[in-house]
């Protein structure tokens, strides 16, 4: 606590790395109590609206009359009310999602980001594109306040700051209530294929689901969201097609140009291009195609193979509308289904004692996502998901299906060791010149016509290249965006990357002046997705 309460007036930054159930929230609350008693405001952020009610309850019990909430869940009027109230009559404790970081608190003493690694802290669109962690750091510095980052699986960005001495590391390695981590079992899908099993549901998975649900317990089954950026991997040997220059999977680009199809593989970091191949370079197999299966298809497969099972789908389609998430989770909590099949959303904050099994249907879908932080985010989600199994008194189990069981992400999950992964991944990113060792900025352009937009991107590139080049920055592209056309608008992008430090970019106004009429520009510093 001393590292969060020293009244030097300078504040500081602390990474609280604590395993699930190690009591991180209690530390947030104690630090908040100290700063509220000093008459200073406290900001407590969590990545998802779904996590707010629980945290809000705890805060209100501890600090009656001092707590305000702020999230996109509230009406405009309610948000304006919080905006007005938090300026006077403090100190306040505000619990909110990322946009709460902009609230005009009078005298900030402490800013907390729970689950600081969560990509939901980044706003990618619309402008302004920002990361709540960066804004919180800026505000804490301005106010001489403390920034407290909490996570069971810290981001590489925060880990790097610890190594550089800019952030103090605190670790919690024990669970407060004891309890055991679930057993983790890996199913090698290459062997399933070799023995003639061509379905996404392996035999061990079928058997375990039958056993668990037969005992009257429940399972969650996680299907990675089908990405905008499909990649190629080999179902026989598990290899994905990677960029020869970077540690990134190549993305399949399908373009239709005057009737003809132009399929290429493209690296989103360095713009390397190569033709689409139809067999694996490692083993020659033809079981080689873009990766991905949707939740709906998985539900169909399960229905065919395990007809007695009661299934519930939890994804963007089924959770639409106000309270959509809560409605489905409540149905599941009342045991109206045996298995909940869903995307990433499943991993977050669900606390159901009857769930004793968590399944990762296709780990490869996250591990090889053609993105800068694919491996890091895959492991973070898997650990979170593993935390969902066996929350009650019954022991839990996790089953992971993958074509690459020897992959560092899978091995780290099995060993329950995020440490080893962190060090290995940091080294790989350093070697390949990737974030957090370099900075990047994505300029996204959109316009009504493909030609004007591409033209604008080219103009922007030649406008920027000389100035950026002098400062060690590279301009990559222009390249078509992963989804080249959305809502009648054509989309192109320019990627800039260069050394750590401030972005040497002219003002947005200056950049927009270069563009043809009707072409919009979004500036996304340190992009999460390429
Ligand atoms: Zn192969
Ligand atoms: Zn590359
Ligand atoms: Zn692409």
Image: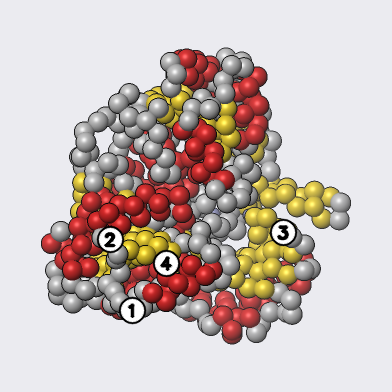
Label 4 sits on a secondary structure element that is helix
Mark 2 beta carbon near ligand 3 (under 8 Å) = no
Q: Where is residue 454 shown, x and y percent of the image? A: 72, 69
| Residue with the mark numbered 2 | 64
State the residue in front, 248 or 32.
Answer: 32
Q: Residue at x 75, y 52 (%)?
A: 255
Residue picked out by circle 4: 100
Q: Mark 1, residues whose alpha carbon is within 10 Å: few (<14), some, or many (≥20)?
A: few
Q: Within 8 Å: ligand 3 and the Cβ of disc 4?
A: no
The x, y position of residue 230, in whole percent, is 62, 44
The residue that label 1 is drawn on is 88
Secondary-structure class at tag 1 = loop
Q: Which of marks 1 and 2 is in front?
A: 2
Q: In this view, does 465 lie above or below 225?
A: below
**Circle on res. 251:** none
- Cα separation, mark 3 vs mark 4, equals 30 Å
Please give the residue where the numbered disc 3 appears in the rendered image: 486
Residues at marks 4 and 2, CA–CA distance in whole angstroms: 20 Å
- Inter-mark Cα distance, 1 to 2: 17 Å
């Amino acid at each position: 606590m001393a590292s969060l309460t020293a009244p030097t007036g300078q504040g500081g930054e602390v990474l609280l790395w604590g395993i699930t159930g190690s009591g991180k929230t209690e530390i947030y609350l104690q630090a908040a109590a100290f700063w509220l008693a000093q008459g200073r405001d406290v900001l407590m952020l969590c990545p998802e609206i779904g996590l707010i009610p629980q945290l809000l309850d705890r805060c209100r019990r501890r600090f009656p009359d001092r707590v305000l909430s702020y999230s996109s869940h509230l009406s405009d009027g309610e948000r304006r009310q919080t905006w007005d109230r938090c300026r006077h009559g403090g100190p306040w404790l505000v619990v909110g999602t990322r946009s709460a970081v902009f609230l005009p608190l009078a005298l900030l003493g402490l800013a907390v980001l729970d689950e600081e690694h969560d990509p939901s802290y980044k706003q990618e669109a619309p402008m302004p594109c920002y990361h709540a962690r960066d804004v919180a750091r800026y505000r804490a510095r301005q106010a001489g306040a403390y920034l407290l980052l909490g996570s069971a699986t810290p981001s590489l960005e925060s880990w790097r700051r610890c190594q550089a001495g800019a952030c103090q590391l605190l670790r919690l390695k024990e669970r407060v209530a004891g309890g055991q981590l679930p057993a983790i079992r890996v199913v090698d899908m290459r062997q399933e294929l070799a023995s003639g099993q061509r379905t996404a549901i392996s035999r061990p998975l079928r058997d375990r689901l039958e056993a668990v649900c037969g005992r009257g317990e429940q399972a969650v089954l996680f299907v990675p969201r089908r990405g905008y950026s499909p990649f190629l991997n080999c179902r026989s040997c598990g290899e994905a097609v990677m960029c020869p220059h970077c540690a990134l999977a190549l993305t399949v680009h399908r373009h239709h140009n005057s009737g003809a199809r132009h399929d290429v593989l493209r690296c989103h970091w360095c713009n390397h291009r190569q033709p689409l191949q139809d067999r694996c370079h490692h083993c020659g197999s033809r079981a080689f195609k873009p990766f991905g299966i949707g939740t709906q298809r998985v539900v169909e497969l399960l229905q065919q193979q395990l007809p007695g099972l009661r299934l519930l789908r939890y994804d963007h389609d089924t959770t639409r509308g106000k309270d959509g998430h809560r409605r489905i989770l409540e149905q599941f909590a009342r045991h109206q289904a045996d298995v909940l099949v869903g995307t990433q959303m499943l991993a977050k904050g669900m606390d159901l004692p009857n769930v004793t099994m968590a399944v990762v249907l296709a780990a490869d879908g996250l591990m090889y996502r053609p993105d800068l932080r694919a491996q890091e985010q895959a492991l973070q989600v898997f650990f979170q998901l593993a935390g969902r199994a066996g929350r009650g008194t019954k022991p839990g189990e996790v089953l992971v299906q993958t074509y690459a069981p020897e992959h560092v992400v899978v091995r780290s999950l099995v060993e329950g060791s995020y440490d080893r992964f962190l060090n290995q991944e940091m080294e790989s990113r350093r070697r390949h010149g990737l974030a957090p060792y370099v900075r990047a900025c994505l300029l996204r352009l959109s316009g009504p016509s493909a030609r004007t937009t591409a033209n604008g991107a080219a103009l922007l590139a030649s406008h920027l290249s000389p100035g950026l080049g002098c400062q060690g920055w590279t301009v990559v592209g222009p390249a078509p965006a992963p989804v080249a056309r959305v809502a009648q608008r054509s989309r192109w992008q320019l990627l800039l990357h260069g050394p750590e430090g401030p972005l040497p970019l002219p003002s947005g106004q200056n950049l927009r002046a270069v563009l043809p009429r009707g072409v919009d520009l979004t500036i996304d510093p340190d992009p999460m997705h390429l």
